[in-house]
Image (tube, rainbow, N blue to C red):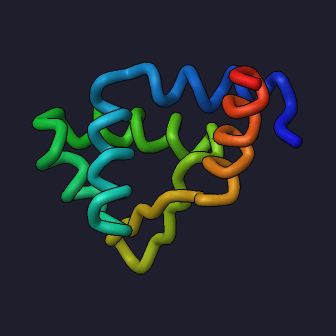
Amino acid sequence: MIEPNEIEKTTAAIANKYRLSILLELAKKGSITGTGAQEITGLSQPCVSHHVKLLVDSGLVVSQKTGRCQKLSLNKEVFDKLAGFLKKLSE
């Protein structure tokens, strides 16, 4: 079961065109680097870092650091919870 504050955080994170483009790319490729997220959005590195931080804080994205390289991937468990909540709304 997903808590109301989790719903608010995840939906707010999805509701931004740059963060949504990162999520869509992650869904397509499985994982990308922080540099890859910058290429997708066309934003500066500090700006992309801000958006990635919001995605990680929302629980939608998992970030793994190896040295200076950051690997991003979707947190499918959180998406499953959100999907279950949305499905309940439509019943």
Can residue 88 be seen by looking at this rendering?
Answer: yes
Most foreground residue, 30 or 38: 30
Q: Can you tell which quarter of the image residue 10 is in?
A: top right
Question: For this view, does 48 lie left or right of residue 54?
Answer: left
Residue drawn 21% across the image and 57% down it: 35
Residue drawn 41% across the image and 62% down it: 72
Question: Residue 41, image x and y in percent?
Answer: 18, 37
Question: For this view, does 90 lie left or right of residue 42?
Answer: right
Q: Can you tell which quarter of the image residue 87 is in?
A: top right
Can residue 46 be seen by looking at this rendering?
Answer: no
Residue drawn 45% across the image and 63% down it: 73
Question: For this view, does 58 lie left or right of residue 24?
Answer: right
Image quadrant occupied by the C terminus: top right
How many numbered marks are there?
0
Instruction: Name the outermost residue toward the front.
Output: 91
Question: Residue 30, image x and y in percent?
Answer: 37, 68
Residue 32 versus residue 3 in the image, above or below: below
Question: Residue 32, image x and y in percent?
Answer: 30, 64
Instruction: Name the outermost residue toward the bottom.
Output: 66
Image quadrant occupied by the N terminus: top right
Q: Can you tell which quarter of the image residue 57 is in?
A: top right
Question: Residue 24, image x and y in percent?
Answer: 32, 46
